[in-house]
Amino acid sequence: MAAEASAGDEFDVAVVGGGLVGVATAWGLAREGCRVVVLDEGDRAVRASRGNFALVWVQSKGLGLAPYAGWTIKSSNAWGGFSDLLKQETGLDVAFQRPGGFHLCLSEKELETRANNLKRLHNQPGIVDYKTEILNHDQVKAMLPDIGPEVVGGSFCPLDGHVNSLRLFRTLHTALNARGVTYLPSHRVENITREGGEFRLMTPHGEIRAAKVALAAGNANMRLAPMVGLEAPMRPERGQIVVTERLRPFLNHPVVTLRQTDEGTVMIGDSKEESVDPSGLTIGVSATEAERAVRQFPLLANVNVVRTWSAIRVMTQDGFPIYDESKTHPGAFTVCCHSGVTLAANHALTIAPMIARGALDASLVAPFSARRFHVQAAG
Amino acid sequence: MTASADLAPSYELVVIGGGPAGLAAAALAARAGVSTVLFDENPGVGGQIYRAITSTPVKDRAILGEDYWDGAKLAEEAKASGALIVNGATVWSLDRQRIVGISIAGKARMIEAGRVIIATGSQERPFPIPGWTLPGVMTAGAAQTALKAQGLVASGRTVLAGGGPLLWLLAAQTLRAGGKIDAILDTMPRRNWLHAMFHLPGFALSPYFGKGMALLKEVRAKVPIHRADTIEAVGADRVREVLFSSGGETRRLPADLLLLHQGVVPNVNLANAAGVAHVWNDRQLCFVPVLDADFGSSVPGIAVAGDGAGIAGGTAAAERGRIAAIAAVRALKPDCIVPDTQAIRQRLQREEMGRSFLDLLNRPVDAFRQPAGNTIVCRCEEVTANQVRDTAKMGCEGPNQMKAFLRCGMGPCQGRLCGLTVAELISAERGATLDEVGYYRLRPPVKPITLAELASLPISEAERKAVER
Amino acid sequence: MFKRLADSSPAVGIIVDGKPVSARAGDTIAAALLAAGIGHCRTTPVTGAPRAPYCLMGVCFDCLVTVDGVGSRQGCLIPVREGMKVETQLGRREAGR
């Protein structure tokens, strides 16, 4: 339902942001019977959902905030059911697979750093054990026969998986459309006020009114959250991806920096740069990604690169999600995180029902309140 | 043959494309004393209009016509000018700092440029009809290329369809070369004449008037011409017949070769990836770069000359190349002596005269630009018109979101054969202007390079640290 | 589909899917395939549909072929060479080829 909203329209929930976090939350809200409007920017929006790496990833998550590991595993476990539900509704298969994933190391030093990080992660109090193992070259080669001689080893976690994230994006939009959710592109939210028990969201195409508001606008949450008595301290960063032509299947497990999609293309990535210019692209960074990919999988050397991409990561200041409800503006929530693919199942099936009920369940999400930034500052 | 390793790390001027605009620009700049390199991805210079001008096996000058042989002088001048001309060289990247990514024989290099002239010309407008992906369906330009470069002429049962000067020129050249054309399906509606007539005085004064009339007469005398409101290529493994309808009546023609053409449009990929601003040109129904009087783009130091600046033909392209080159020389070496632009601008104006008439007369109808049903729009990823239309109805309002949803434009051609169609379909479904809809945001490599080539490029410490952590 | 005008370009022998094909100096691979009457040069990686050269000017990528063991080469941009091995590319390319 892409119809223009008229001034008189009123919704149960306005979701601000039409990326993966926003549409997963909106779909979950619609399943709860809410009348939902999704307010999105236009085609040229800075959109992390079009540039992500599509992993449903567990290993490495939680160093510095132990509950994040459990939260991630919860979503990873819910993912199969989530993708089934989407398929039933839309007929579209988002190609979710959980064959276990690798982090590959190209030197002994990298492997040592990897092992130390995992040890620190697992030594945290209250951490869930997710059975990540360090493997040597031969052990990796037994599972990934095409690795090159420079791969000294790596880590493997059986819970890691991946999905076709662009199809997930399309599928969620299709499902929203089928459920009658109002989707309004080019409705950048300029201001939010709360009057007479409802929220008024100002856009270039008029005012939208809703009983509740869920901020799922990625890095723009930093601007929006203070309007409703919330906060979302962000530190966006740029990542680049290299994409090859479609190839016959050769890789049965995703690697954190390299995976083969169900369509056959190989995505290569995981760079981090300070720049927040989404139109820029650093060739030397793409070159580094390519060079490491060829060392990891020498058979890729003469494969054609058909695209590169840079996108701005949604990143909170400490890298962990922010889920909050406003004390001053009851009915306002933030849903803000980096891993919009991995956590999509949680956003749709856990966060959305909480918002529909009007209160977050502290037993699940209290560690992810933005109040943690003040505790740290005070400490 | 110049190899990647033979190139200097930088040139004062890099010209991209060896058609009339590129050849004229390189010749002028090099003669003025500017270090100039011209990169062209084809085996020889000439671009499309003067394709294979230095090597064509077609020796009978009457077959290709005198206009074609004009290209020989341009090629000779460029060769004699001292510009380094590198064929088989694919430019796959250009950025705002004017770093040019080049690939020659599977070896990539980055070259610095003081100024850049993009002279990548035009390509044929997408012609998405049912069956246009079948073997045996080609563009008219492709048949013309095969004639110019290899002396191949259509034999068997051949049908031409569409409209525009190139279609009629190809028909005449094919007939002169002893080829056979069974029918021409004219898709340009008669009402185009009404809109075009207003601009006829300008056209009548242009050099194209007499030539165009003679060409039509030559072809009409030998080939049956049918009007067509719809066209479909039919066949399982290859085209076997062409279905067309006119005034509600459907007819079938057996065919081994169907050659399609409905005009040419700027080849925008490289300029777009470099960040050059483009706007919709409603008369030519395509995106064109925003340019100043010297063909300078919105990116400092990067000019776009030739048909890439908007369609005006080969002779105009050369004049545009010269104007862009003069601006480049003046910026690089103010003391160098360059020709006065006054005379060049006058010649260019004369060439551009009558363009409005041609554009309006040959304006393709909506049905052939905005297909319906299961007609393939994106040839690479096999995305249909209905998929694009339905997704636009769902709320998708631009080609970049469309690309994310449907993969249109994600294949190796990188949107060259679907970009305009997708943009126009979104515009039609959402009632938005083409400037509101916009175009794919393109990124290097604009032509594929291998992972090993990308891996071989220089990497700074900071760039390595951005990946290795 | 196409015939050659009489001309004097020297013959160049190439191998297409294991069979000898006589091309001419100045041919690109795509032109040589068209002149030899070869039906299609690849099948698509999406539906397996047959494709043949469409634009001959480097923009459509429908003439992708495997050349001397390297896949996804643009046949319309590469001149033929004596002894060159050209193979029809079937569906998705195989990594390492």
Image (spheres, coloured by chain):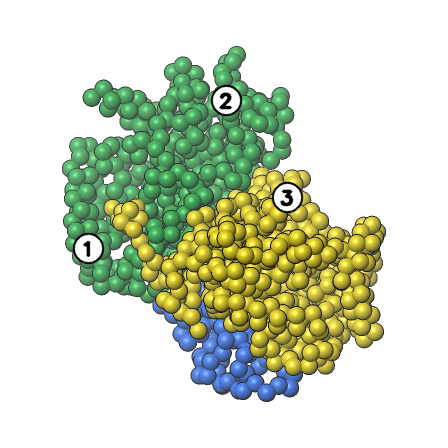
In the rendered structure, the colour chosen for chain A is: green
SS for tag 3? Answer: helix
Circles 2 and 3, Cβ within 8 Å, touching? The answer is: no
Q: What residue is pinned by disc 3?
A: B434
Q: Kindly report the distance in space between the C-alpha atoms of the residues bearing marks 1 and 2.
A: 50 Å
* Chain coloured blue in the rendered structure: C
Which label number is shown at residue A122? none
Image quadrant containing the C terminus of chain A: top left
Please tell me in which quadrant of the rendered image residue A20 appears.
top left
A19 relative position to B228: left or right: left
B378 relative position to B460: left or right: right
Image quadrant containing the N terminus of chain A: top right
For this rendering, which residue is in front, B159 or B280?
A: B280
Circles 1 and 2, Cβ within 8 Å, touching? The answer is: no
Q: Which chain's residue wears label 1?
A: A
* Chain coloured yellow in the rendered structure: B
Q: What residue is pinned by disc 1?
A: A107
Q: Kindly report the distance in space between the C-alpha atoms of the residues bearing marks 2 and 3.
A: 29 Å
Q: Which chain's residue wears label 3?
A: B
Q: Amino acid at mark 1?
A: Ser
Q: Is residue B450 visible from the viewing direction of this image? A: no
Q: Amino acid at mark 3?
A: Leu
Same chain assignment for discs 3 and 1: no
Same chain assignment for discs 1 and 2: yes
Q: Amino acid at mark 2?
A: Asn
For this rendering, which residue is in front, A327 or B322?
A: B322
Which label number is shown at residue A191? 2
- What is the x, y in percent for residue B128? 65, 58
Q: Kindly report the distance in space between the C-alpha atoms of the residues bearing marks 3 and 1.
A: 51 Å
